[in-house]
Image (tube, helix red, strand yellow):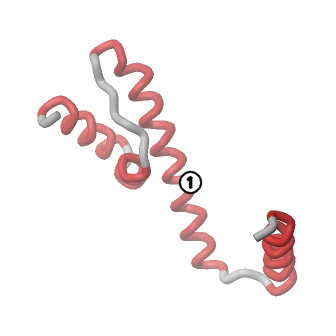
Amino acid sequence: MNSTIIISIIVVLILILLFVGTPIKPMRWIGQGIVKLGIGVLLLFFINVFGGAIGLHIPINLFTAIIAGFLGLFGVASLAAIHFFII
């Protein structure tokens, strides 16, 4: 498809959602999930930056971001333990 058609379809959907409204609870869950994923990516980034001195490198992908985001520091600690003891 042409990119202008796709962009115009997205714009129309956004305008419909603005006028009609969105279901509040599912949008809140999606928003909180995206924020937690972002926090997980940031935690993994800082672990990779500061852990590089001791040889700690945890790849940043969707799975590790979900673990770090939803479990927080315990998730990052478990990923680091898996890296040290298993890998």
**Left or right of 45: which side holds 77?**
left
Query: Which residue is tagged 1?
Result: 35
Q: Secondary structure at mark 1?
A: helix
Q: Is residue 73 above or below residue 56?
A: below
**Left or right of 49: which side holds 83?**
left
> Toward which corner of the image does residue 85 lie, by quadrant?
top left
> Toward which corner of the image does residue 55 lie, by quadrant?
top left
Residue at 45% from the left image edge and 37% from the top image edge: 43
Residue at 79% from the left image edge and 78% from the top image edge: 13
Image coordinates for residue 29, horizontal then vertical, percent: 54, 70
Which quadrant is the C terminus positioned in? top left
**Left or right of 36: which side holds 4?**
right
Residue at 55% from the left image edge and 61% from the top image edge: 32
Image coordinates for residue 70, horizontal then vertical, percent: 40, 55
Most extreme residue toward the top, as rendered?
A: 53
Most extreme residue toward the bottom, as rendered?
A: 20
Q: Amino acid type of disc 1?
A: Val
Instruction: Count the numbered circles shown.
Output: 1
Which quadrant is the N terminus positioned in? bottom right
Image coordinates for residue 14, horizontal then vertical, percent: 81, 74
* Circle 1 crowding by C-alpha within 10 Å: few under 14, some 14–19, many from 20: some
Most extreme residue toward the left, as rendered?
A: 85
Residue at 81% from the left image edge and 67% from the top image edge: 2
Image coordinates for residue 51, horizontal then vertical, percent: 35, 21
